[in-house]
Image (cartoon, grey):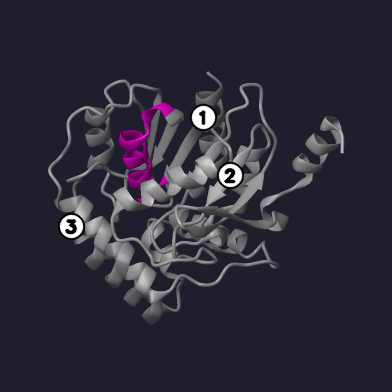
Amino acid sequence: MDHAAHEQGAASVRFANAPTRRIEAGGTEFVYRELGSDGPHGVPLVGMTHLGANLDSWDPELVDLLAAERRVILLGYRGVGGSAGTPRDRFEDMAADAIAAIRALGLSRVDLFGLSMGGMVAQEILEQAPDLVDRVVLAGTSPQGGTGLSTMTGVFVRGVARGLVTFTPPTSVLFFTRTRTGKHAARRYQARLRRRTVGREQPVSPAALRAQLRAVKLWGHQRPPGASVFSGPVLVVHGDSDRMVPPANADALRHRFPSAQVRVFPDSGHGVVSQNRRIVADLIGRFLAA
């Protein structure tokens, strides 16, 4: 297949039909999905998702928008979904896994997009391998010692319980405000998550979820760090009504990355990226292309 044909084929892949691929790295096998084609800078965007999520948990519309201009690689976590191994309970280890997988894919330079827990993993990648990363987007996340992280387990459990009582998906309860705008955004989000009907991942196991909650709690109890060793461009996106990772953490990230661009969206919770997906995709696109 010539280069033009390859580019055309890559462009036709969307989140709903992107094949799940596998890569050996760090002594185990990770799943990942790849969309889009190399943009003008040739640096792919590597995405890491939120707590309790597998590859199917990405917002299809957001991923398709991002992949329209660049190559996007969505990485799975060890022991989650189709990835082998025992789930990690420290972000340092999750970061080491991600670095190993990125290098096994033959990549020497990437942009990072860390969503919630994925943003915590991304920050550890910046500490362990700063030369691997060009630019980073941190959405709905926090540095070590961030506000509210040590109590996130309680917030999460209460959100799941409320979802069961009201027959509402837990992510609708936890990720969106209870305003008219938030409820509408939650319904549309759940509908988009159902777009992928083939090749879906295994559900996240209770063991994996417990390990991730331990990692968040440990991260929350750590001493707030000083300025990062990473000196590249950083974009921080947050919702002003985030109950899982309170918005004060956006300011904490500004201290961690003094030159960061920070954008806080009104009437938006932990699902800020999905609720404002078109604006956020445009914001990320311009940030990565600058």
Please give the name of the residue rendered at 70% of the width and 67% of the height, measured from the top-left corner: 198
- What's the CA distance linking mark 3 and mark 2? 30 Å
Q: Which residues are magenta?
A: 115-131
Which comes before the other along the chain, label 1 or label 2?
Answer: 2
Task: Work out whether residue 172 or residue 179 is closer to the camera in this orientation and state it.
Answer: 172
Q: Would you name the residue on which mark 2 appears?
A: 73
- What's the CA distance linking mark 3 and mark 1? 33 Å
Task: Work out whether residue 276 or residue 106 is closer to the camera in this orientation and state it.
Answer: 106
Please give the name of the residue rendered at 61% of the width and 59% of the height, measured from the top-left corner: 192
Please give the name of the residue rendered at 28% of the width and 37% of the height, measured from the top-left corner: 250
Eye-nearest disc, 1 or 2: 1
Which comes before the other along the chain, label 3 or label 2?
Answer: 2
Mark sitting on residue 109:
1
The N terminus sits in image quarter: top right
- What's the CA distance linking mark 1 and mark 2? 13 Å
Task: Work out whether residue 249 or residue 76 is closer to the camera in this orientation and state it.
Answer: 76
| Residue extending farthest bottom | 165
- The answer to the question of whether label 1 and label 2 lie on touching residues, with beta carbons closer than 8 A, is no
Task: Work out whether residue 74 or residue 22 is closer to the camera in this orientation and state it.
Answer: 22
Residue 273 % position (x, y): 47, 45
Q: Would you name the residue on which mark 3 appears?
A: 150
